[in-house]
Image (cartoon, rainbow, N blue to C red):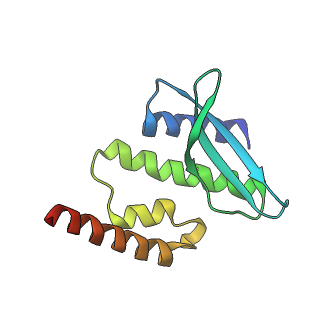
Amino acid sequence: MSSKQGERIQANCKTIWGSDYTYDLSIETDDYVSHICFVRKDFGDSFGSPIAMTSCCPSSEAAWAELDRMLGLWASQVKRGTPMTKNERLEIFGGPNGKHNAILSKFIDEFELREGAKKQA
């Protein structure tokens, strides 16, 4: 990850989750074929649970680029101050080029159906 990219990711984290924290950015791979980036709050002596992560990417560069893309879109949505729409969720969390949009769309629909049922009860 370039320093410019890291600075942009950190700035977007602060926009999304607040500037009271610094954020640990890490990348993991289990087989050097799939790479995943994680964001965790940095508490100084420990890190929190992941608050964002990418889907599996084919290289470390692709994973950092995906995290940068996701958080850039998410930060823009937060700055607008409006509720996140389904289309925004799909664009942000659907993976590179909307790779996971079909399954994510079904999940969002089911979640909204269940939440609506809870409010009716």
| Residue under the point 57% across and 70% down | 97
Most foreground residue, 64 or 3: 64
User: Where is 5 relative to 57, above or below?
Assistant: above
| Residue under the point 48% across and 33% down | 14
Q: Left or right: 116 with respect to 109?
A: left
Instruction: Name the residue furthest front.
Output: 121
Most foreground residue, 50 or 64: 50
Q: Quadrant of residue 60?
A: bottom right
Q: Left or right: 79 with respect to 118?
A: right
What is the number of callouts on the image?
A: 0
Instruction: Name the residue furthest right.
Output: 32
Quarter placement of the C terminus: bottom left
Residue 115's spot in the image, x, y percent? 27, 64
Residue 13's spot in the image, x, y percent? 51, 38
User: Where is 25 relative to 73, above or below?
Assistant: above
Residue 53's spot in the image, x, y percent? 59, 52
User: Where is 17 relative to 84, above or below?
Assistant: above
